[in-house]
Image: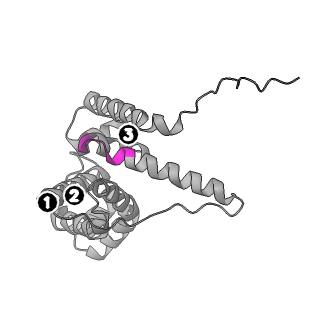
């Protein structure tokens, strides 16, 4: 069944089908919420806010109209608004929560040194993204992690497509500038006195 067919069935009273919609989108929404919370060190709340997103969507499903947006766009918009609301509540100087420490697992054939370097690079990229302003960060996550097109991102963020492209351009530039010191490999001049004889 397509999302549209599921939604029609749910609206007609087959509410148990909502679990199928959740199954389709839960991982993506959870990842999106997690990335939005990371810069505020509140990622431990990601699962709760993901659940809240799906609860809000279920309660408002009767008002969802496909002519206005796709279900996924509508769901991401609810997730973003839920996170922003929570961030506003916690902005009044609360202590940051401990980081959850998600570390990618390297395949067994990768040497430990390579796994550590890869993990450090992933961490640096995530930190660079977390340092972006909220709209740039959201646009970059939706584009690079969730593979959404420009129009979908524009709908979620309430921006024009050209504004989204501009946000992405600035976000990528900022990430590049933040990472340059870590990935720049200087070329050393030949050391004097070490000439071969």
Residue assigned mark 3 = 149
- Residue at left offset 53%, top offset 60%: 104
Q: Which mark is residue 93?
A: 1
- Residue at left offset 28%, top offset 27%: 162
Res. 185 image quadrant: top right
The single residue placed furthest to the front in the displayed view is 193
The picture places residue 166, in percent across and down from the top left corner, at 30, 28
Q: Is residue 193 magenta?
A: no
- Figure quadrant of the N terminus: bottom left
Sequence-wise first label, 3 or 2: 2
- Residue at left offset 33%, top offset 59%: 34
| Main SS category, magenta section | helix
Q: Which mark is residue 83?
A: 2
The picture places residue 136, in percent across and down from the top left corner, at 29, 39
Q: According to the image, what is the colour scheme of the structure?
A: one colour
Compared with residue 87, is residue 156 higher up or lower down, i.e. above or below? Answer: above
The picture places residue 28, in percent across and down from the top left corner, at 38, 58
């Amino acid at each position: 069944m397509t999302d549209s067919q599921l939604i029609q069935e749910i609206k007609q009273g087959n509410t148990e089908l909502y679990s199928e919609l959740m199954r389709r989108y839960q991982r993506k929404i959870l990842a999106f919420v997690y990335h939005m919370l990371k810069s505020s060190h509140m990622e431990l709340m990601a699962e709760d806010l993901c659940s809240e997103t799906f609860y809000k969507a279920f309660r408002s499903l009767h008002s969802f109209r496909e002519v206005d947006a796709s279900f996924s766009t509508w769901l991401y918009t609810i997730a973003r608004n839920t996170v922003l609301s929570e961030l506003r509540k916690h902005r009044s100087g609360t202590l940051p929560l401990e980081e959850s420490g998600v570390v990618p697992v390297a395949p067994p054939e990768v040497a430990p040194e390579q796994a550590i370097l890869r993990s450090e690079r992933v961490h640096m990229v995530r930190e660079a993204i977390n340092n972006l302003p909220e709209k740039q960060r959201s646009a970059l996550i939706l584009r690079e992690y969730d593979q959404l097109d420009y129009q979908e991102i524009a709908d979620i963020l309430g921006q024009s497509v050209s504004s989204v492209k501009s946000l992405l351009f600035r976000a990528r530039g900022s990430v590049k500038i933040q990472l340059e010191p870590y990935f720049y490999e200087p070329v050393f001049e030949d050391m004097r006195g070490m000439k071969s004889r």
